[in-house]
Image (tube, rainbow, N blue to C red):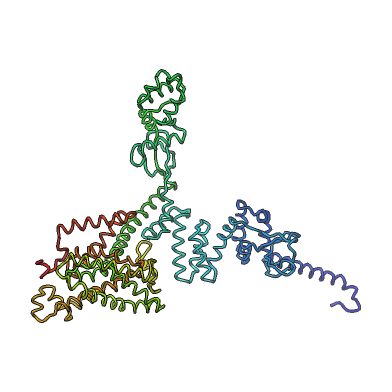
Amino acid sequence: MCPLRSIADCIPMIRVIAATLALLLTSLSASAQDTNGAIQQVLQEHSVAILKSSRTTIGPAIDAVADSGLPQAQAVLQAWSDRNMWVRAADGLFFRATEAEGGYSLTDFDTGETVGVFGSDALDQIKPNSGIRALIGTALVQFQLKDPNPRRRQDALTSISRNPDPALLKPLRNSIEMETDPNLKAQKLRQERLLTIGYDEDPDARVQAMADMSGDLSVDVRAALNPLVATRRAVVKGAAQGEVPAGTNVARILTPGSDALPKVEAYDMLVAADLAPPRVTDAAIRTALEANIAEGRVGDVAVQQLGTDAARRAAYIALADAGTVPPFISEEAVQETLDGFTFYDAYADPSPQITDAANDALNAIRLKVGLNQAADLTLDALSLASIYFLAAIGLAITFGVMGVINMAHGEFIMMGAYTGYVVQQIIPNHTLSIIVAIPLAFAVTFAAGVAMERLVIRWLYNRPLETLLATFGISIALQQLAKNIFGTQARPLTAPAWLDGAMTLNDVVSISYIRIAIFFLALFFLAVFLFIMKRTRLGLETRAVTQNPRMAASMGINPGRVNMLTFGLGSGIAGVAGVAIGLFAKVTSEMGSDYIVQSFMTVVVGGVGNIWGTLAGAAMIGFLQKGIEWGNPSNTLAAQTYMIIFIIIFIQFRPRGIIALKGRAAGD
């Protein structure tokens, strides 16, 4: 300390200390400015490109921000993409701007502090176009992959799957280890494999990724592999296979005139590449001859002598020899020209290692796809068979057991479907309405069947032709009655929400929940029918009447009552089938006619009067129809025609069906 009496002597020392402190404060301020202004410095280094806002030159600026490693990088990119980044005209600094009273409030990217409100005349908005915004979006993905919010990480993965980019492979790999959500981690691992297949610079890594994904049936795997085995068709002068350009990854050598490369197509390739003169068509020959007619002659040939192709060709060749028209290319010349070239398909990817691995993976996938398509076709056939069985089980009772040709059976199906529709108008809850509709449809159609049997059928037993005509007339009357009540427009029968959608095993195999429910409903009614026939008095009496009605009557059984209840039971099951079918098919007055033919075929093919035969017939027809539709998917009418022809041939060899009934029917 300087003594007070000598303060003048301390002034130089005080000045030195003050200067030192000022220098230290300036240094600290500059250091703080360098730290706080780091992202601004990156933007200033690329300000020309940012202000120009051209997709062709903006890439380095976006990469510089994204790769800066600064915590503000994501906010800058997001503001840039959202068109919230502005530049201050006075000093060229970039800010995030929000609308405020009097203009725009500017926020510093580095400090996050508001620097003031400026009018639009003092600012310029950075307006990236859609192409630049797409590049910024790609850069943002690497930040979103590590975002604490799982939804943003999921959005990033969705973005990668929709727009794969080689630049995303590295940040995706870096984010896998720190992923805590098992589902998101599995998605990241899968997406990393797909990007590796398409974009990794290491061939061995790509081959390993293909091997890892070779058993995957998803469409995106095939989408990643197919570009690797895409080929382009090319031609090179020289007849030897080794004369293809060096470094070409040849898929196959093509022979002109084969199925893979017709001769005309091969020569057209040469013409398109200016490697051969174009051929002269017959139409061009006619046009050339017409243009060179002089005094009724073409050269030395009279016009009257040009009535054949050979004569016209000869006249044209004469003109070509004289240099009047382009030369004529004969078949021999075409073949000679083709023999001097090599035609081949080349892979777009130059590496045989990559294309071989891609082909191996695709072949393995095709095999699994084929097996799964067979499984999917089997499920479809089982579903269709269960529908036919449900529609035919009632007919198996009325036609198979009673011998009544009931052409109105389809209308009982329609009646059950409309019953379900009416119930849904009263009970809006779809689950409860279906639970109520099934027994109510059985009751309604059971009563209708009993009434029909008592009023019409009972008078026509053992008179099949009259029964057929009478029931056919009843079916027309019931259709017209339905039109009068419900109109001609299709009515909706809505399935419960828990039956929406489908059970998907993979990208190939799936089956709707409605069809699964119908399958189990068919099994349920099979069990109910077997229980009634094997465990109840009605079943015992029905079997007795079926095998020997006179003996059954002599034992105290009333055949008329048994026939009435049996006919009612068959009609009631048809009504339940109508509710089930109405859940996925249109409910109209004609819907029963769509199933009556298949129902009769199911009963006849399976074996008249045998429930197991009906089940076998439904399975046979379901698989047959699906198999024919698979072979000829564009023409369902032809498929039904082929199916009927097959069944006609089948019953020539097994007229009693797959499982013939024993007893009375066997002897009839």
Above or below residue 53? Residue 11 is: below
Q: Quadrant of residue 29?
A: bottom right
Q: Is residue 329 left or right of residue 570?
A: right
Query: Would you say 28 lies left or right of 533 here?
Result: right
Residues 410 and 219: in front is 410
Q: How many marks?
A: 0
Q: Residue at x 52, y 64 (%)?
A: 156
Dividing the picture into quadrants, the one containing residue 552 is bottom left
Quarter of the figure with the N terminus? bottom right
**Residue 460 placement: quadrant:** bottom left
Residue at 66 percent across and 53 percent down: it is 52
Can you give x and y, in whole percent of width and height, for residue 497 in the image? Answer: 40, 74
The residue drawn where x is 86% and y is 77% is 2
Say which of 551 and 358 sits in front. 551
Q: Quadrant of the C terminus?
A: bottom left
Residue closer to the observer: 416 or 347: 416
* Residue drawn 81% across the image and 71% down it: 17
Relative image position of residue 465 (x, y in whole percent): 18, 64
Residue 311, image x, y percentages: 36, 24
Left or right of 264: which side holds 20?
Answer: right
Can I make out residue 236 in this image?
Answer: yes
Outermost residue toward the top?
300
Q: Nearer the viewer, residue 605 or 3?
A: 605
Residue 409 left/right relative to 332: left
Mark yes or no: residue 526 visible. Answer: no
Q: Position of residue 414 (x, y in %)?
A: 31, 70
